[in-house]
């Protein structure tokens, strides 16, 4: 109750007070400013007063108040009470309170207040009624028209009731709080509907007077129902006092009134249920009987025993019983399939020789090992003990770390995560792929059989003659030399230029003639090495082939469709006689330096590539030897051309740019295919004699095998060189190929291509040929195969050619 | 639009749970969780990716399977743990109220008893499963059986461990299922075969175990609690399977007197068997009679042959040969060396043979030998009559030391003085029993062996030569029976020649000139080991002295001698050995070889000069040497070529492998190379040791 009161107190402070007064005053006075200020002042005052009052009250009546509260029946009419309190407080704000005011806050107080407010008024009313009883209830008046008018007097509602609760005067607003009328000048209506005027609030002087001579029974409270000052008689005050002191309020008060029994044992004439009482209410329960009998039986049989505290002996006996297994857990065992997630704890490995108390002497650590072991961190040690030798069993001391080791094992068992690791316990040899035995792949070059020395500076290019008897080579010194490669003997040489290097030497690929093409600077020289090296008829045929073009060129000068001379980028001419004496029969001068030259298989066409040319259109040229004609097939070539080659059987033309290889159909004059080897810079390509596989070597150390049937990406990528690969070559007849690299080695592979396209090519590495020196980071610059034998010749940057057989 | 999945709501993060999450889920304390995990055998898992699994930002280290933890939720033990916790609260409350009696009563009556039976059954659904997992249990229980009782290890646990382990040993004795044993520096390893499962355990030597501060006995006690329950059930099953009553009778009085194994008397399940099953002791008349009968056999043989020891050995061999048990396995000997060799079971693989190994002998254990392991091993390999010194515990001993029935005496002393001059050689001898024996003398008619003989015999499955193990003799190395020699690994049982690679042989031959260094190193090694040994001696310095004297008598095998010699030669040797690390220990043979080499060089030079003077060719000895050298060079070249070819071939094939495979290959090659290196190191050490030994023997022979 106290808490709820406190809460209400808090609430009260927060509740905004009705502003009716303000409005009223505004309306009446018409002074807004002053009103506000006045009002504020008055409010402040009243607040202060309230606070003061409260304090006082708490001091004075605190205990009584509490007692009153505790005596109260917990009220079901909290709301009403709250209302009353609200009213009281509202009034409190306007009037100064007295100590007794506090009493009104409680229920009893309220009752009392109603009683006390009513009684005197009622008495007064009764007197009035008696006096007016005989008079007629109306009087006759004359109205405005001169007609008589009955003016009825006020109706006196004499109910003759002794209802003391009903207030005689008659504010008919009923049970609504008076504060609703705060905004109005009246406080309600009497029975006739007239307004009951608000009792005049005393002027300051009146109130002063009032306070000076207090009338009898003055309380300072306002009767909430009438709005008039509440006056209490002496008896009433006495009663209140007694009640507040928890005494009997008066003489006639019966503190223990007779209890009224609303429900009694008396049988009613009309009971709520007329059903007769069931039998089970009168017979003993058979279910209970059953249960009891069960218990009785159990007790008799000894199943239920009275509780007995265990003695020490009992407990020991029990423990002894439990200490040893009494039954077989696995009596009806059933194997359970092991769960794959269950990883059984790994067993400790059995001890090895070194753990013996008397191991073989070789297992004992020497001083170094001992030191190493001792300095090592405990976790890094391979073994947790040092092998020791004890000559006899009696000398074996206890093992210090036994308990620790077992403890660590325990920790491992429950703390270590277990992971199944498949341990590779296989012979590494079995991982190696099965390859055909190199001896089955024979023949292939294995050793260096001969070295041809003579070139000054690098040997840039080399070529086997079509018969396979000689090797031609050209190098940085501007000379072309012919070697008998089996012996390394130089057979013939010609110096083409003093300043420029011979970039390419290449034999015309047919046996009926013996023509060597050599590119030196911007010129391509066609040479018939004049010596006794070839048969005279072959030599004559060669001369004829080289010369035939002159006649054609003279007959059909190159003209465009418009008849204008074609702009020639090349000129075919006879060299000077000194050169002709040396065997140089024809020269073709281009605008830029050709770096590669490749022949068509028939020997009539050849193609040159000059990567350094200004216009990409003139990079690749196809020349016709018999017509002394040069064509530039590409108007615009994508990428920088590196090298070209002709297909051995089809009219296909392979052009390798830096990163791609394009295949053109020469007849239909369109691109057939584009290969994407993935190399950064292609150095050389070599087409398999069957024409279905292409080898691409690149400066980024890769060798790429393209199967033209398979797709645009390489079938195999081989990376076995540590430096750039300069050249690659297929053997013309045997399933071999070799590449030359700047790391000074040649690698020979077995590359077998099966005719049908169902089977992929097999590539087997065979041999790494070492011998060439690496000069200025250049190793082997070229490699060529003998036309028939499994021999190859390599050209080295060290100025030598090596024959590998 | 599909709902965006929340992180950690499915997949791996659902499958794993961190330890703290698990503890929270189970609502128990961490120690209780630990116990529960130990009991239930639940262990953390390693997720593939920890990051993916952890739901929190802080890295957790321990993960469990969620399902494992879920399965723990239904564990009855969990309720017990909670009861325990509630009880603890009650007790503390009572103590807080100063009601000690009440607290005591509560503790007495309300303490929940943990029963692990259902867990045993759950973790090991079949008996074989339990046997398979017995390794750790046995090691642990044997350790606890040997621990002193402390506050952490109450005596109750220790006695229980002792009893359980003894019972287990009795089973092994009864069924002869012990197979192998090994004396290691850590303790004694035993291996038994139970129902086809190999069980290996380690028993510490009888010393007070050092327990450092970093050992948490609560964890170990939890394990022991589980293991005792397990071994109890295993013992029950084992005993009942051979028709014995479990638990066997435990003679408390005998135990107090130190009876050891004999304190437990297994009984048959029906009354008739009981008599037979009783362990043979001196008081058992029936066994006595049998023993006498058996004993008479070697005696009869012994009359015919001179040395009693040889006789005993012979008889042992004879009895084995005479009646080869029909059900034992034959040994298959491959005729062709190239043919595949099949794995053959070892001789002790069946209990029939194991049960007969020591059956016909009577052993006496000297007071310095470890009685318990010896008794256990001898009994499980068929020996029924074992006597020991009274100081080792009275009850159970078959006979005293002076008993005439004793055939073998196991001693571990430097050497025993002989009662009379040796008949043939100094090992063993026969002497008439009438001679008065001094306290420390040998009793004639017995084989005296060191304990290692027993172990080596059982591991080999046959009796070893007793003379190698005679008291005071240098024992042959004790080898682990579990190491299976693999190809390329070092095997100390084979000679060096059988396992050396060609390269090593070459290197060894080449290195003969530089043998000086090796010899030095070896001397150092030996000195080191000797020093260590001396340091390891525990108080029997007189024994060591005795041994030294003996070795001096033998002559030639002592390192001290070499050391003293080398001190003299040291100054001379110092010049020849610039990189001498262990100056004081250089062996004399090293100097010998150095001197030899110098002398030979001068001799050769002389011969050359002579040849020059006379105009002749050099003598044929040197030419023979040249030939040899040439041959060696040729072989070396050939080998080098072969190696190179092999290497090239390997390279060639490696080139064809994909990169990943190549990496794996390289790893494997690396690990193999490490193994090879280790083996090579061991072989190198052995060669050096052999060289030193040979040189010393040669020197010794020359000296004599």
Image: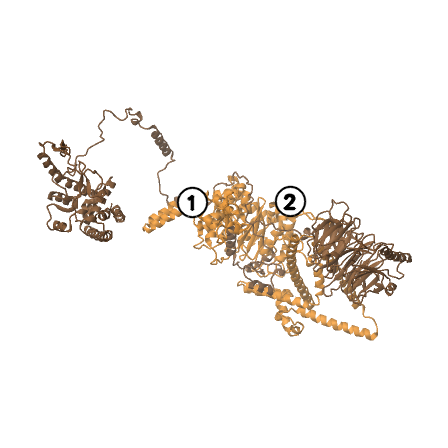
Chain colours: A brown, B orange
Task: Pinpoint residue A432: horizontal percent, then vertical percent.
Answer: 69, 52
Q: Nearer the viewer, mark 1 or mark 2?
A: 1
Q: Would you say the residues marked 1 and 2 are in contact, meaning their CB atoms lie under 8 Å apart?
A: no
Subunit that carries the residue with mark 2: B
How many badges with numbers are in the image?
Answer: 2
Name above or below for residue A24 compared with residue B214: above
- For residue B703, what is the image quadrant? bottom right
Residues flagged by tags 1 and 2 on a common chain: yes
Residue that appears at 90% across and 61% down: A532
Q: Quadrant of the C terminus of chain B?
A: bottom right
Pick the front one: A708 or B338: A708
In this view, which residue lies farthest toward the bottom?
B613
Classify 10 Å Cα crowding around label 2: few (below 14), some (14-19), many (20 and above). some
Label number found at residue A271: none
Pick the front one: A302 or A799: A799
Of marks 1 and 2, which one's residue comes earlier in the chain? Answer: 1
Element at badge 2?
loop
Whether residue A576 sits left or right of residue A61 in the image: it is right
Name above or below for residue A326 compared with residue B201: above
Disc 1: which residue: B80
Name above or below for residue B538 compared with residue A764: below
Disc 2: which residue: B328
Task: Pinpoint residue B691: horizontal percent, then vertical percent.
Answer: 68, 64
Pick the front one: A436 or A735: A735
- Cα–Cα gap, marks 1 and 2: 53 Å
Task: Pinpoint residue B318: horizontal percent, then vertical percent.
Answer: 65, 49
Subunit that carries the residue with mark 1: B
In this view, which residue lies farthest toward the right?
A536
Whether residue A633 sits left or right of residue A514 in the image: it is left
Element at badge 1?
helix
């Amino acid at each position: 109750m106290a808490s709820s009161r406190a809460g209400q107190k808090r609430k009260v402070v927060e509740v905004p007070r009705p502003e009716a007064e303000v409005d009223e005053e505004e309306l009446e006075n018409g002074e807004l400013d002053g009103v506000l200020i006045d009002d504020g002042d008055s409010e402040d005052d009243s607040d202060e007063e309230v606070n003061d009052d409260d304090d006082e009250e708490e001091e004075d009546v605190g205990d009584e108040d509490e007692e009153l509260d505790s005596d109260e029946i917990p009220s079901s009419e909290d709301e009403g009470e709250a209302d009353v309190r609200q009213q009281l407080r509202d009034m409190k704000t306007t009037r100064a309170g007295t100590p007794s005011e506090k009493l009104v806050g409680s229920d009893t107080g309220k009752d009392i207040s109603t009683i006390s407010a009513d009684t005197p008024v009622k008495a007064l009313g009764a007197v009035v009624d008696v006096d007016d009883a005989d008079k007629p209830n109306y009087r006759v008046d004359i109205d405005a028209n001169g007609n008589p008018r009955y003016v009825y007097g006020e109706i006196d509602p004499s109910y003759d009731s002794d209802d003391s609760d009903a207030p005689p005067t008659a504010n008919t607003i009923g049970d609504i709080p008076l504060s609703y009328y705060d905004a109005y000048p009246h406080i309600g209506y009497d029975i006739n509907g007239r307004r009951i005027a608000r009792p005049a609030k005393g002027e300051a002087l009146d109130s002063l007077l009032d306070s000076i001579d207090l009338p009898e029974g003055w309380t300072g409270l306002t009767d909430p129902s009438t709005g008039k000052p509440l006056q209490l008689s002496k008896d009433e005050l006495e009663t209140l006092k007694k009640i507040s002191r928890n005494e009997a309020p008066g003489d006639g008060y019966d503190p223990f009134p007779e209890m009224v029994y609303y429900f009694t044992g008396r049988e009613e004439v009309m009971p709520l249920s007329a059903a007769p009482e069931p039998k089970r209410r009168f017979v003993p329960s058979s279910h209970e009987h059953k249960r009891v009998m069960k218990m009785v039986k159990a007790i008799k049989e000894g199943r239920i025993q009275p509780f007995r505290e265990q003695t020490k002996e009992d407990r020991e006996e029990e423990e002894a019983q439990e200490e040893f297994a009494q039954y077989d857990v696995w009596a009806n065992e059933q194997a359970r399939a092991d769960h794959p997630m269950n990883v059984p704890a790994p067993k400790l490995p059995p001890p090895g020789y070194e753990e013996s108390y008397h191991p073989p002497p070789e297992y004992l650590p020497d001083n170094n090992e001992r030191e190493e072991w001792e300095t090592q961190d405990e976790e890094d040690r391979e073994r947790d003990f040092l092998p020791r030798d004890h000559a006899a069993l009696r000398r074996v001391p206890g093992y210090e770390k036994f308990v620790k080791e077992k403890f660590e094992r325990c920790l491992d068992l429950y703390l270590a995560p277990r992971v199944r690791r498949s341990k590779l316990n296989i012979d590494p040899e079995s991982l190696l792929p099965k390859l055909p035995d190199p001896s089955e792949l024979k023949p292939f070059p294995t050793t260096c059989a001969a070295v041809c020395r003579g070139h000054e500076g690098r040997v840039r290019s080399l070529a086997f003659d079509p018969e396979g008897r000689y090797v031609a080579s050209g190098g940085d010194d501007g000379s072309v030399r012919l070697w008998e490669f089996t012996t390394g003997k130089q057979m013939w040489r010609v110096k083409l230029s003093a300043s420029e290097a011979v970039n390419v030497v290449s034999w015309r690929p047919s046996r009926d003639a013996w023509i060597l093409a050599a590119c030196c600077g911007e010129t391509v020289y066609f040479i018939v090495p004049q010596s006794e090296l070839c048969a005279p008829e072959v030599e004559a045929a060669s001369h004829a082939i080289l010369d035939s073009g002159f006649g054609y060129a003279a007959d059909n000068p190159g003209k465009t469709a418009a008849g204008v001379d074609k702009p020639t980028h090349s000129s075919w001419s006879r060299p000077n006689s000194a050169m002709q004496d040396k065997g140089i029969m024809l020269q073709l001068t281009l605008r830029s330096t050709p770096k590669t030259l490749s022949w068509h298989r028939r020997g009539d066409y050849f193609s040159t590539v000059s990567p350094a040319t200004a216009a990409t259109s003139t990079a690749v040229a196809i020349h016709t030897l018999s017509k002394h004609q040069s064509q530039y097939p590409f108007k615009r070539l994508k990428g920088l051309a590196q090298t070209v080659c002709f297909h051995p059987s089809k009219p296909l033309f392979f052009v390798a740019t830096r990163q791609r290889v394009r295949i053109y159909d020469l007849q239909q004059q369109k691109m057939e295919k584009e290969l994407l080897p993935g190399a950064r810079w292609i150095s050389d390509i070599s087409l398999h004699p069957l024409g279905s596989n292409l080898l691409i070597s690149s400066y980024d150390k890769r060798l790429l095998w393209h199967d033209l049937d398979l797709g645009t990406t390489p079938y195999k990528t081989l990376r076995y060189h540590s430096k750039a690969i300069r050249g690659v070559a297929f053997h013309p007849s045997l399933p071999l190929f070799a590449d030359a690299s700047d790391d000074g080695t040649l690698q020979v592979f077995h590359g077998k291509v099966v005719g049908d396209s169902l089977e992929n090519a097999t590539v087997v590495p065979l041999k790494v040929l070492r011998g060439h020196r690496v000069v200025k980071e250049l190793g082997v610059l070229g490699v060529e195969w003998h036309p028939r034998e499994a021999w190859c010749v390599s050209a080295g940057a060290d100025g030598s050619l090596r024959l590998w057989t | 639009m599909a709902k965006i999945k929340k992180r950690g709501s499915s997949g791996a993060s659902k499958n794993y749970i961190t330890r703290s999450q698990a503890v929270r889920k189970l609502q128990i304390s961490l120690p209780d969780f630990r116990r529960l995990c130990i009991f239930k055998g639940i262990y953390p898992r390693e997720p593939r990716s920890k990051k993916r699994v952890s739901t929190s930002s802080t890295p957790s280290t321990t993960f469990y399977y969620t399902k494992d933890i879920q399965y723990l939720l239904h564990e009855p033990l969990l309720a017990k743990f909670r009861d325990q916790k509630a009880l603890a609260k009650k007790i503390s409350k009572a103590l807080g109220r100063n009601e000690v009696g009440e607290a005591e009563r509560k503790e007495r009556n309300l303490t929940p008893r943990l029963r692990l039976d259902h867990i045993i059954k759950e973790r090991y659904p079949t008996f074989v499963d339990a046997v398979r997992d017995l390794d750790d249990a046995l090691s642990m229980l044997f350790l606890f059986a040997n621990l002193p009782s402390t506050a952490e290890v109450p005596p109750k646990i220790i006695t229980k461990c002792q009893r359980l382990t003894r019972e287990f040993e009795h089973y092994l004795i009864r069924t002869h299922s012990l197979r192998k044993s090994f004396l290691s520096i850590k303790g004694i390893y035993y291996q038994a075969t139970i129902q086809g499962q190999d069980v290996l355990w380690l028993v510490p030597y009888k010393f007070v175990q050092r327990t450092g501060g970093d050992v948490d006995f609560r964890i170990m006690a939890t394990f022991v609690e589980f293991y005792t329950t397990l071994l109890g059930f295993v013992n029950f099953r084992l005993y009942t399977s051979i028709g014995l009553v479990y638990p066997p009778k435990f003679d408390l009085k005998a135990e107090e007197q130190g009876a050891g194994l004999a304190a437990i008397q297994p009984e048959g399940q029906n009354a008739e068997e009981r008599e037979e099953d009783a362990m043979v002791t001196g008081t058992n008349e029936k066994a006595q009679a049998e023993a006498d009968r058996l004993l008479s056999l070697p005696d009869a043989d012994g009359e015919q042959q001179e040395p009693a020891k040889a006789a005993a050995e012979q008889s042992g061999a004879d009895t084995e040969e005479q009646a080869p048990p029909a059900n034992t396995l034959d040994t298959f000997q491959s005729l062709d060396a190239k043919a595949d060799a099949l794995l053959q079971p070892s001789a002790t693989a069946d209990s029939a043979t194991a049960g007969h190994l020591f059956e016909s002998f009577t052993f006496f254990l000297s007071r310095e030998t470890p009685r318990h392991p010896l008794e256990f091993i001898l009994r499980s390999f068929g020996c029924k009559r074992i006597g020991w010194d009274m100081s080792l515990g009275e009850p159970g001993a078959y006979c005293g030391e002076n008993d005439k029935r004793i055939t073998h005496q196991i001693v571990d002393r430097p050497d025993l003085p002989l009662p009379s001059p040796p008949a043939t050689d100094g090992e063993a001898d026969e002497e008439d029993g009438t001679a008065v024996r001094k306290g420390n003398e040998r009793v004639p008619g017995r084989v005296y062996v060191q304990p290692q003989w027993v172990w080596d015999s059982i591991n080999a499955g046959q009796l070893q030569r007793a003379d190698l193990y005679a008291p005071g003799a240098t024992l042959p190395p004790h080898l682990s029976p579990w190491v299976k020699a693999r190809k390329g690994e070092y095997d100390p049982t084979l000679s060096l020649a059988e396992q050396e690679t060609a390269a090593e042989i070459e290197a060894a031959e080449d290195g003969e000139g530089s043998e000086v260094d090796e010899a030095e190193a070896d001397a150092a090694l030996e000195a080191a080991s000797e020093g260590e040994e001396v340091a390891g001696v525990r108080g029997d310095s007189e024994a060591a002295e005795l041994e030294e004297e003996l070795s001096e008598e033998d002559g030639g095998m002592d390192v001290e001698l070499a050391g003293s010699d080398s001190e003299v030669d040291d100054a001379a040797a110092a010049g020849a050995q610039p990189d001498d690390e262990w100056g004081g220990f250089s062996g004399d043979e090293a100097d010998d070889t150095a001197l030899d080499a110098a002398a030979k060089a001068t001799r050769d030079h002389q011969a050359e000069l002579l040849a020059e003077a006379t105009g002749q060719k050099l003598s044929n000895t040197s030419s023979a040497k040249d030939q040899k050298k040439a041959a060696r060079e040729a072989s070396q070249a050939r080998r080098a070529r072969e190696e190179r070819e092999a290497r090239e071939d390997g390279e060639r094939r490696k080139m064809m492998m994909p990169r990943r495979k190549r990496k794996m290959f390289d790893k494997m090659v690396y690990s193999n190379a490490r193994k090879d290196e280790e083996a090579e190191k061991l072989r190198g050490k052995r060669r050096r040791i052999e060289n030193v030994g040979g040189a010393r023997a040669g020197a010794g022979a020359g000296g004599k």
